[in-house]
Image (spheres, grey):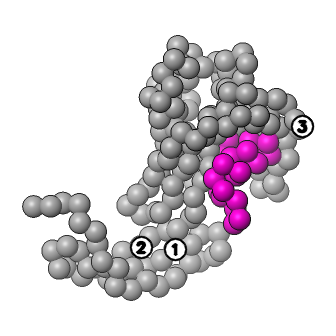
């Protein structure tokens, strides 16, 4: 039996409670013919995330309160891709806004799905190894961000201890480790 067949979308109704949380009710037909009339899907929008490494082999992280988690979380700089921006342009902007660092050279690493069952969100990952301090942070009204530099050889230890626990941050770090293993030695 083939298990990777797509579901057929029969109907989509926007039931978003606000512009900040796009939510849709789908009626879908499964490959076996069964109809599900209450499948809920969020379309939060794609994100660009940056793993930026200083000349001193430190990775630039941000720490900020995340209301869903109910605590301050350490993660890589990231942000939703704004209308009209490419994932790369958004990565450069978010790095500058959240940390004050400017990317002089940026490489696309790939992408990961954060919650593929219930959200369309895709996190695009970028690597920056050539940084300069451009200015201080330029934070949005809802942001209160602490910039943290973590030596590259301590990252795995901090993930194992739970200090770094954001799933997309861990996935981007691992993807980067697989594509650039010498960078993490």
Give the image location of residue 76, x and y in percent: 63, 38
Q: Secondary structure at mark 2?
A: strand
Is 13 on the left-hand or right-hand side of 150? left
Q: Is the Cβ of the residue at disc 1 closer than 8 Å to that at disc 3?
A: no
Q: Secondary structure at mark 1?
A: strand
Q: Is the Cβ of the residue at disc 2 closer than 8 Å to that at disc 1?
A: yes
Give the image location of residue 139, x and y in percent: 82, 49
Using the image, determine if residue 101 lies above or below residue 98: above
Using the image, determine if residue 183 lies above or below residue 21: above
Question: What is the spatial separation of the Cα atoms under label 1 and label 3, in whole angstroms?
Answer: 37 Å
Give the mark, 2 or 1, whose residue is nearer the N terminus.
Answer: 1
Q: Residue at x 52, y 13 (%)?
A: 185
Quarter of the image where one finds residue 27: bottom left
Disc ID at residue 23: 1
- How many numbered marks appear? 3
The residue carrying mark 3 is 135
Q: Residues within 10 Å of mark 1 (few under 14, many from 20)?
A: many
Give the image location of residue 164, x and y in percent: 55, 32
| Residue located farthest toward the right when viewing the structure as drawn | 135
Question: What is the spatial separation of the Cα atoms under label 2 and label 3, in whole angstroms?
Answer: 42 Å
Q: Residue at x 15, y 61 (%)?
A: 2
Nearest the viewer among 55 and 75 is 55
Q: Residues within 10 Å of mark 3 (few under 14, many from 20)?
A: few
Using the image, determine if residue 105 lies above or below residue 38: above
Residue segment shown in magenta: 71-98
Q: Residue at x 44, y 28 (%)?
A: 178
Q: Secondary structure at mark 3?
A: loop
**The stretch drawn in magenta includes residue 96:** yes
């Amino acid at each position: 039996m083939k298990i990777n067949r797509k579901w057929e979308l029969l109907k989509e109704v926007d039931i978003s409670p606000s512009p900040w949380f796009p939510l849709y009710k789908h009626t879908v037909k499964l490959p076996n013919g069964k109809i599900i009339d209450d499948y809920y899907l969020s379309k939060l929008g794609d994100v660009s995330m940056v793993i930026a490494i200083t000349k001193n082999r430190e990775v630039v992280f941000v720490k900020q309160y995340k209301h869903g988690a109910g605590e301050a979380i350490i993660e890589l700089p990231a942000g939703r891709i704004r209308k009209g921006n490419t994932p790369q342009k958004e990565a450069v902007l978010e790095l500058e806004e959240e940390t004050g660092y400017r990317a002089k050279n940026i490489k696309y690493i790939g992408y990961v799905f954060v919650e593929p069952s219930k959200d369309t969100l895709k996190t695009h990952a970028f690597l920056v190894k050539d940084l300069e301090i451009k200015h201080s942070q330029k934070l949005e009204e809802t942001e209160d961000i602490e910039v943290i530099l973590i030596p590259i050889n301590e990252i795995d230890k901090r993930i194992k201890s739970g200090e770094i626990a954001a799933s997309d941050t861990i996935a981007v770090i691992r993807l980067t480790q697989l594509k650039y293993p010498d960078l993490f030695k």
